Amino acid sequence: MYTSETKQDLCPYVWKRFDEANYLTAHVEDSPLLMAFNNFKVGFVQQPTDYYLRTLMLAVYKNEGNYVSMKCHHGDMFGGF
């Protein structure tokens, strides 16, 4: 049984099956504040997918300080990425 104390790494998410089949995997949330896998939970200890943008989005949020600048940084979405 999974509880709020269970590390999310131990849960059988579908991207683990895709990773085993040699697909590249990614996880992106609209905002680091949404925290679908961290809200009232332990969250991930290991990076869960090949591309995991939560770390980048948290850094942008910390440096810019609000959600508006998360969406558009100086008129350019994350510097044109």
Image (spheres, rainbow, N blue to C red):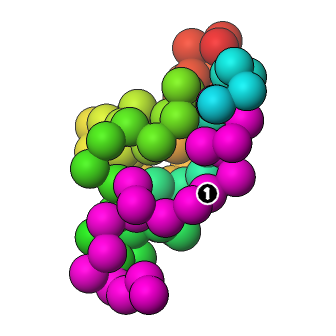
Q: Is residue 40 above or below residue 69?
A: below
Q: Is residue 7 left or right of residue 30?
A: left
Q: How many marks?
A: 1
Q: Is residue 16 above or below residue 9?
A: above
Magenta highlight on residue 2: yes
Q: Residue at x 72, y 35 (%)?
A: 18
Dividing the image into 4 quarters, which one contains the C terminus? Answer: top right
Q: Is residue 76 left or right of residue 5?
A: right
Q: Residue at x 26, y 50 (%)?
A: 45
Name the quadrant containing residue 47.
top left
Residue 19, position as x, y percentages in the image: 64, 31
The residue closer to the viewer here, 37 or 80, is: 37
Q: Amino acid at mark 1?
A: Tyr
Dividing the image into 4 quarters, which one contains the N terminus? Answer: bottom left
Q: Is residue 24 above or below residue 55?
A: above
Residue underneath mark 1: 13
Name the quadrant containing residue 46.
top left
- The reply to whether residue 71 is visible in this rendering is no
Name the residue furthest top. Answer: 80
Magenta residues, start to end: 1-19
Residue 3, position as x, y percentages in the image: 37, 87
Residue 64, position as x, y percentages in the image: 35, 40
The residue closer to the viewer here, 59 or 72, is: 59
> Regarding mark 1 in the picture, which secondary structure is present there?
loop
Residue 65, position as x, y percentages in the image: 33, 50
Name the quadrant containing residue 5.
bottom left
Magenta highlight on residue 80: no
